[in-house]
Image: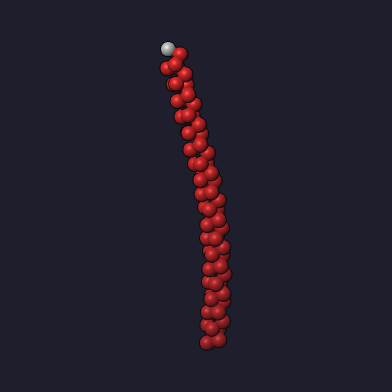
C-alpha cells in the first residue's frame, strides 16, 4: 500500500530528525562538560601549587626558628 509506505517513511524521517537533534544537544552538553572539567582541573592544580608553596615557606620559617633557638 503506497499510502502506508509514505506514512511510514515520513514517520521514520521524523524519528531520524528527532534523534539527530537529541544527539546534537548531547554532544554540546558533552563538550561543555569537558571544558568545565578542564577548568576545574586547572583550578585544582593551581591550588595545589599554592599550597605546596605555602608549605615550603612554612618549612623555611620553622628551620629559621629552629636555628635561632640553637
User: At x 48% / y 24%, what residue is drawn?
Assistant: 10
* Direction bottom: furthest residue: 69
Q: In the rendered image of this protein, does residue 2 appear above or below residue 57?
A: above
> Residue 51: x, y in percent?
53, 68
Locate residue 66, reporting x and y percent. Answer: 52, 82
How has the structure been colored for display?
Answer: secondary structure
Position of the N terminus, as image quadrant, is top left
What is the residue that sits farthest to the front in this orientation? 3
Callout count: 0
When the figure is inspected, residue 57 is found, relative to residue 69, above or below; the finding is above
x then y, percent, for residue 7: 44, 21
Viewer-closest of 4 and 45: 4
- Tell me the residue at 53%/64% (across/down): 48
Residue at 42% across, 17% down: 4
Picture layout, residue 66 above or below residue 3: below
36 to the left or right of 5: right
The reply, left or right, for residue 9 in relation to residue 46 is left
Q: Nearer the viewer, residue 35 or 48?
A: 35
Front-lying residue, 28 or 69: 28
Q: Quadrant of residue 43?
A: bottom right
Residue 24 location (% of width, % of height): 53, 39
Can residue 16 be seen in the rendering of this structure?
yes
Residue 52 visible, this angle: no
Amino acid at each position: 500500500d503506497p499510502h502506508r509506505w509514505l506514512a511510514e517513511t515520513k514517520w521514520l524521517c521524523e524519528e531520524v530528525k528527532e534523534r539527530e537533534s537529541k544527539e546534537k544537544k548531547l554532544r554540546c552538553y558533552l563538550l561543555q562538560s569537558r571544558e568545565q572539567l578542564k577548568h576545574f582541573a586547572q583550578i585544582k592544580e593551581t591550588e595545589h601549587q599554592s599550597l605546596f608553596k605555602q608549605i615550603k615557606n612554612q618549612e623555611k620559617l620553622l628551620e629559621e626558628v629552629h636555628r635561632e633557638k640553637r
